[in-house]
């Protein structure tokens, strides 16, 4: 597959600049106009047909090249995280205090996937192979709904498989399952009054929110052990001497499987309704979104691992290791990991293959919904120091640095090399489809976002 690696090498200066450009212009979920426009421009310049907007989201797009089967999708993300603005320095220092930043490395994801898409296009042309390469521009991953809205819109119904890269501290494929989730806000509406002069005329929305939170905490004893509930009260009223006519409490429900999320969510809604009844208020259930647990496809994961080993892992310079070592000193000394850290180096230069098969983690990704319908895998490459955790300033300090850029270029080559294996050997895709069918055990997908819930754009 020398063709795709040569193309990525040729495009490397542009891809590095693109990833840095997105890093310098971080945009939170559903506002990624700068990022989506620059990614689309890059693809248009390289011969892709663009459809935008899609799924009712102005920053979501689909870029296609080729015709017929196989139809292989690449999944780019590009939203930033609120509050993680950070310079490329080894101490915490925001570019813009309180501003967004790329503490999850989605700037690298955007650049890697478009680079891989162009490399595959050129390789298919050269080899004369049939097939379609599709680049999905997926916004709002950080709120776990962008891809779910795209699934609901039917954008993946004709796709044979998808591949996804995410920045990591290792080169490998984590086979664990990520959680299913519901994201919901409970808006309580009461009757305002003076809390001292006429409290009996008021109906306190703040009381309702507090009672709901109490009820949710009692609920914890009577739910499956793999379910987690967490919340924050975003609006509890304006002043102590005013009976609040509005309050809001915001909840996440997470579990290993979708059925447990749905079951506990229904009971949590009942708790909210009960709190409203007790206080003479009214509750509005504002479901923000939800997603399924992930389901890694082993056939595709093994193809990724083959590509990684053929290409060989990136080697970091002494300067990059020194930078990462300074970041290591600011991180937890015993981070939670399902693999053994590489000793005596801040940057792991191994390829660790498939790992943590059968494991489970409570964090979530909206990839899960695609994985219920289409054989898919997601993998990581080293883009930040070993002890850093995602959603940290240390990660943001690396995703705009040559460390992250080196991992991004490697990921583009892995994506493109793997896609070309699948185009050349469609039987692998058929095997991946059979694996998915077996893993689903006859279960059918039901979108967790109701039809009447629109993207918050």
Image: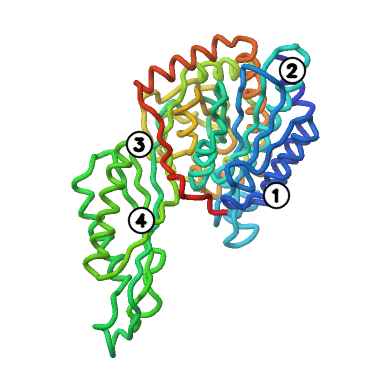
Is residue 406 something that shows in the picture? no
Q: Secondary structure at mark 2?
A: helix
Rendered location of residue 44, percent (x, y): 77, 35
Quadrant where the N terminus is found in the figure:
top right
Q: Does 427 sit left or right of 66 as displayed? A: left
| Disc 1 from disc 3: Cα separation | 34 Å
Q: Residue 302: percent from the left, percent from the top?
A: 51, 16
Mark 2 vs mark 3: in front: 3
Q: Residues within 10 Å of mark 1 (few under 14, many from 20)?
A: some
Question: Circle 1 sits on which residue?
Answer: 34
Residue 50 falls left or right of residue 257 = right
Question: Which residue is labeled 4 in the image?
Answer: 231
Is disc 4 in contact with disc 2, using a CB cutoff of under 8 Å?
no
The answer to whether residue 59 of the structure is visible from this angle is yes
Q: Earlier in the sequence, mark 4 or mark 1?
A: 1
Marks 4 and 3: in contact by CB < 8 Å? no
Q: Nearer the viewer, residue 242 or 82?
A: 242
């Amino acid at each position: 597959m020398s063709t795709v690696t040569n193309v990525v090498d040729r495009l490397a200066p542009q891809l590095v600049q693109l990833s840095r450009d997105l890093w310098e212009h971080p945009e939170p979920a559903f506002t990624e106009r700068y990022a989506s426009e620059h990614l689309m421009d890059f693809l248009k310049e390289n011969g892709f047909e663009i459809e935008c907007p899609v799924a009712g989201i102005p920053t979501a797009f689909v870029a296609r090249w080729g015709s017929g089967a196989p139809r292989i999708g690449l999944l780019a993300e590009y939203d930033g995280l609120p509050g993680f603005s950070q310079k490329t320095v080894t101490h915490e220092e925001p570019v813009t205090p309180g501003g967004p930043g790329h503490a999850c490395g989605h700037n690298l994801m955007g650049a890697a996937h478009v680079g891989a898409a162009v490399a595959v296009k050129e390789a298919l042309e050269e080899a004369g192979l049939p097939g379609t390469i599709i680049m999905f521009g997926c916004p709002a991953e950080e709120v776990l709904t962008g891809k779910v809205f795209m699934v609901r819109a039917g954008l993946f119904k004709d796709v044979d498989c998808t591949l996804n890269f995410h920045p990591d501290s290792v080169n490998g494929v984590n086979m664990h399952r990520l959680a299913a989730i519901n994201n919901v806000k409970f808006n309580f509406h009461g009757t305002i009054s003076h809390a001292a002069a006429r409290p009996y005329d008021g109906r306190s929305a703040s009381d309702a929110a507090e009672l709901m939170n109490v009820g949710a905490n009692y609920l914890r004893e009577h739910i499956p052990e793999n379910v987690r509930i967490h919340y924050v009260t975003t609006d509890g009223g304006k002043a102590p001497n005013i009976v609040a006519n509005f309050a809001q409490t915001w909840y996440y429900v997470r579990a290993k499987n979708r059925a447990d999320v749905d079951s506990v969510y229904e009971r949590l809604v009942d708790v909210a309704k009960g709190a409203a009844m007790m206080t003479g208020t009214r509750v509005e259930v504002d479901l923000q979104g939800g997603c399924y647990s992930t389901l890694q496809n082993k056939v595709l994961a093994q193809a990724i691992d083959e590509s990684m080993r053929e290409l060989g892992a990136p080697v970091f310079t002494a300067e990059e290791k020194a930078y990462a070592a300074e970041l290591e000193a600011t991180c937890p000394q015993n981070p939670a990991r399902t693999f053994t850290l590489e000793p005596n180096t801040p940057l792991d230069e191994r390829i660790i293959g498939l790992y943590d098969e059968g494991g489970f983690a409570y964090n979530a990704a909206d990839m899960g919904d695609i994985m219920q319908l289409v054989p898919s895998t997601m993998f990581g490459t080293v883009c930040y120091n070993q002890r850093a955790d995602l959603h940290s300033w240390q990660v943001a300090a690396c995703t705009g640095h040559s460390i992250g850029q080196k991992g991004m270029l490697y990921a583009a080559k892995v994506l493109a090399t793997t896609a070309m294996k699948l185009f050349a050997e469609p039987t692998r895709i058929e095997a991946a489809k059979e694996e998915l069918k077996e893993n689903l055990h006859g279960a059918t997908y039901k979108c967790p976002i109701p039809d009447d819930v629109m993207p918050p754009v």
